Image (tube, rainbow, N blue to C red):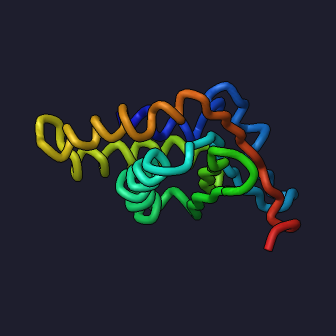
């Protein structure tokens, strides 16, 4: 399950040529931002998806030394489902892989296989998050830090 969660954030990173996106010595520092977008219906489904994110995404993202920043955002206006964005910032594409490995270890430590906590994590993923994740879109962006605040 953890691999599926992090794939939301990395998407097509494996198909990119990392050396083309890494900053060169004579170029401004760059960062990599992953953005996953999807829709979650308002009401009970929205609350359950938000609980899932708060339990299984936010804590490890906040602790992960390879993630520079993590944001969850919604636009809750204009239709029957919230637009959701999950964004993570990394120093480089290589840090995405390192963050994934770190996150896998964190997840196994906090939700070990065969425990009631893991069963609940798997249930929550399948029922409260996967239905929306299955329709997500990914973007991997590079940001020149000389144009960022």
**Front residue of 6 and 42:** 42
> Which residue is rendered at x = 23% and y = 42% of the image?
120
Residue 130 image point, x, y percent = 45, 33
**Front residue of 98 and 56:** 56
Classify 15 as above or below 87.
above
Which residue occupies the extreme bottom position in the image? Answer: 149
Is residue 9 left or right of 12 when viewed as pictured? left
> Which residue is rendered at x = 44% and y = 54% of the image?
47
Residue 122 image point, x, y percent = 28, 36
> Which residue is rendered at x = 28% and y = 36% of the image?
123
Residue 109 image point, x, y percent = 22, 50
**Front residue of 69 and 80:** 80
Tally the numbered discs.
0
Is residue 105 left or right of 51 when viewed as pictured? left
Residue 26 image point, x, y percent = 87, 58
Which residue occupies the extreme left position in the image? Answer: 115
Is residue 39 left or right of 54 when viewed as pictured? right
Q: What quarter of the picture does the N terminus occupy?
A: top left
Quadrant housing residue 72:
bottom right
> Which residue is rendered at x = 63% and y = 49% of the image?
82
Q: What quarter of the picture does the C terminus occupy?
A: bottom right
Is residue 80 left or right of 105 when viewed as pictured? right
**Front residue of 136 and 29:** 136
Classify 117 as above or below 146.
above
């Amino acid at each position: 399950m953890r691999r599926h969660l992090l794939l939301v954030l990395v998407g097509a990173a494996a198909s990119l040529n990392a050396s083309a996106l890494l900053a060169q010595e004579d170029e401004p520092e760059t960062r990599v931002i992953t953005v996953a977008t999807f829709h979650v219906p308002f009401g009970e489904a929205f609350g359950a998806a938000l609980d899932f994110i708060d339990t299984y995404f936010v804590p490890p993202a906040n602790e992960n030394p390879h993630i520079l920043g993590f944001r969850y955002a919604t636009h809750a206006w204009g239709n029957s489902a919230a637009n959701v964005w999950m964004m993570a910032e990394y120093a480089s594409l290589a840090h995405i892989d390192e963050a994934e490995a770190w996150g896998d270890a964190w997840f196994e430590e906090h939700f070990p296989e065969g425990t009631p906590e893991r069963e609940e994590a798997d249930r929550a993923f399948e029922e409260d998050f996967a239905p929306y994740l299955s329709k997500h879109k990914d973007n991997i962006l590079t940001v020149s830090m000389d144009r960022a605040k």
